[in-house]
Amino acid sequence: MAIDIEAQVDRILEEAREELIAVVRAEAARAEDKQAARPATDAAGADEPATADDAQAALPNHPPRVEMEHEAPFVYTYPNQTEDGRFIPVSWTGPIPGQAAISDDDITELADTWNVNPCHLRAVLRVESAGSGFLLSEPPPARPKILFEAHWFYKLTPLPVSRTRPDLSSRRWNRGLYKGGSAEWERLHDAMEFDPLQALKSASWGLGQVMGFNYTVAGCATMEQFVVESFTGEKAQFNHMLNFIDNNELMGHLRRGRWASFAKGYNGAGYRANRYDEKLAAAARRCR
């Protein structure tokens, strides 16, 4: 049975919500105790009613950040920039090692590792990947292709970013918020100003456009590992994709070339509308 990623995220968010409510209630209780202990004021001001503006001013701009116990923080030097000013959220400075395009030898090695027909891997790369996993228009070190998903940032961070930056945090998916190319990194950078870890988890990355919140499903222990590996080359990006396929119990379909079952699990129930299964089958046949 495929892993229900959205159900897992909903469960995590519900736990975070309960923790957040507990924190806010505790803060409110402390404020009430402090108010009760305050000395009496003079008669002229003691009974003066609070105004709506006063009540609004008493509210915090943002609710307190709730750290999930199971979730390691993202550690990096901030801001980490290249000489031409491009922001790179990795934990070292200087050139990124590698960044090689995936090679025939890489595909052969991954096919042996995963026990998959190399032609089936090539079919997935041809149909499901984003072309190159990097922004080739950028000078080295090029950044991975990403797409920042505002509706996921809305779900994943407790901060009310949508009040001030609805372009970064949106209750519903909105195609019009995408900027594409290097501009997606500008959106990610802006979102990281609010909540670095959840912003990184709200983008899809590399060849397979695997969502950041799937970093464990992609075979990484931390979000930092996922990001750093995404920078190192297309082989690592494709391995993330294959881990995602395996952990969603789709590897058997890929090995056997059951393209309809694979496409349904990977692309969802609407795979037929885009003929993903037919495209995968045709790409595998052309490879032989």
Image (cartoon, helix red, strand yellow):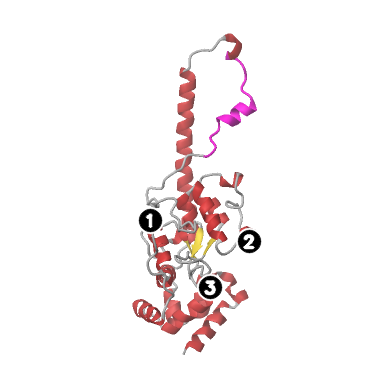
Identify the residue position indicated by label 1 in the image. Answer: 91
What kind of residue is marked 2? Arg
Secondary structure state at the residue bearing disc 2: helix
Q: Is residue 55 magenta?
A: yes
Q: Position of residue 5 (x, y in %)?
A: 48, 61
Which segment did they paint magenta?
Answer: 46-62
**Separation (CA) of disc 2 from disc 1:** 31 Å
Q: Amino acid at mark 3?
A: Lys
Quadrant the N terminus occupies: bottom left
Does the residue at mark 1 contact the one at mark 3 (Cβ under 8 Å)?
no
Q: Residue at position x 45%, y 78% from top?
A: 254
Residue 186: give x, y in percent of width and height: 54, 56
Closer to the eye: label 1 or 3: 1
User: Which residue is rendered at x = 39% and y = 64% of the image?
Assistant: 96
Say left or right for 78 vs 150.
left
- Name the amino acid, label 1: Ser
Nearest the eye: 225 or 26: 225
